[in-house]
Image: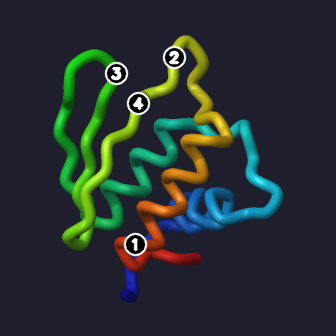
Amino acid sequence: MILNLSSAHRTTLAEIFAEPPRASLAWRDIEALLMACGAERSEGSGSRIRFALNGVRSVFHRPHPKKEIDKGALKSMRRFLTEAGIRP
């Protein structure tokens, strides 16, 4: 799939797939990337947020009190993006 992403979104996508995984990636940057890719977002209860992208659905938790995603959630995000056909 070819996407016209801004340089900031391309950077975020590359950071999601970087090895070793980074623990300092801001959630707001990831959420902005997903929306730029055409994801549909819906709020769940508490910090839950659901995304649907290219027929793939997943539920994530917004990080709190920190604003950065943890490594476990980052791996889940990688899997979600890969299943949706989004790669750097």
1 relative to 13 in the view: left or right = left
Secondary structure category for the residue under label 3: loop
User: Viewer-proximal residue, 32 or 17?
Assistant: 17
C-alpha gap between disc 4 and disc 3 = 5 Å
Residue 43, picture quadrant: top left
15 relative to 62 in the view: left or right = right
42 relative to 88 in the view: left or right = left
Label 2 or label 3, whichever comes before in sequence order = 3
Residue 54, picture quadrant: bottom left
Give me the residue at 29% from left, 35% from top: 49
Labels 4 and 3 touching (C-beta < 8 A): yes
Q: What is the three-letter code of the residue carrying label 3?
A: Ser
Residue 59 vertical position relative to residue 84 in the rendered view, above or below: above
Mark 3 closeness class: few <14, some 14–19, many ≥20 residues within 10 Å? few
Numbered disc in front, either 4 or 2: 4
Q: Circle 3 sits on which residue?
A: 47
Q: Circle 2 sits on which residue?
A: 64
Q: Circle 4 sits on which residue?
A: 61
Q: Circle 1 sits on which residue?
A: 83
Secondary structure category for the residue under label 4: strand
Q: What is the three-letter code of the residue carrying label 4?
A: His
